[in-house]
Image (cartoon, grey):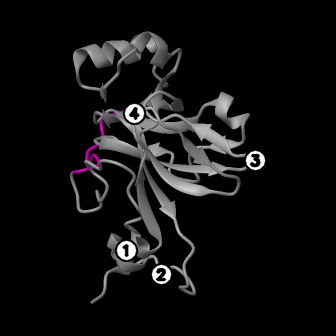
Amino acid sequence: MVLSDGDILRRLEEGDLKIEPLDDPELQVQPASVDMRLGREFLEFQRSNIPCIHPDSEEETDHYTERKVVESGEEYILHPEDFVLGTTYETVDIPRDLVARVEGRSSLGRLAVVVHATAGFVDPGYRGQITLELSNLGTAPVALKPEEMRISQLVLTELSSPAERPYGSDRGSKYQDQCGPTASRIGDDEEWKKD
């Protein structure tokens, strides 16, 4: 069952669900979601001379990304065909009995900006900022305003029972407590481990 605005506000007040800073609940809490603002940090993908990306090589991942921090009050220009990792301004703490989905806002979708390629799922027990996979599918650059712009929506759904192994309780929780956009850590997955 998707949480309504009343349910979201109640859970925030009780403190088991945390979204901070939530400076303007009247504006950010929608009928069935919470609008999340864009953070100031971005990981930009650089053109590189490597023949391909090896997902299990953290060195390669670090080589082809560059961190950019936008000064407060400045804009970030997302160009056509760009793919960058951004982050939410807010930090979340999802309780064991909820799961969240990151969705784009329709107003930005109408400008051809998408906020996730595949990583739209936030597990029960997750804490941290949410990395956004930002793309401009249009033909014109789009100016984004970190800290001010509501970039995405967080839809919260109640589980049939609390997760027995919430995110953070096992070795597969490689993004727990992330701050800022975080590059792929797929090399930490079991199938990539070397003997």
Q: Which amino acid does label 4 sit on?
A: Leu
Q: How far apart are marks 4 and 1 (CA)?
A: 30 Å
Dot 4 or dot 2, earlier in sequence:
2
Q: Distance between the residues labelled 3 and 1?
A: 32 Å
The boundaries of the magenta stretch are 160-168
> Is 110 above or below relative to 65?
above
- Can you give x and y, in whole percent of width and height, for residue 116 in the image? 56, 48
- Farthest bottom residue? 195
Q: Tell me the SS state at disc 2.
A: loop
What label sits on residue 159 in the rendered view?
A: 4
Q: What residue type is labelled 2?
A: His
Label 4 with label 3: CB-CB less than 8 Å: no
Q: How crowded is mark 2: few (under 14 residues within 10 Å), some or many (20 or more)?
A: few
Q: How far apart are marks 4 and 3 (CA)?
A: 37 Å
Dot 2 or dot 1, earlier in sequence:
2
Dot 4 or dot 3, earlier in sequence:
3
The residue indicated by pointer 2 is: 54
Of badges 3 and 2, the one in the foreground is: 3
Of badges 4 and 2, the one in the foreground is: 2
Q: Which amino acid does label 1 sit on?
A: Gly
Question: Is residue 123 something that shows in the picture?
Answer: no
Label 4 with label 1: CB-CB less than 8 Å: no
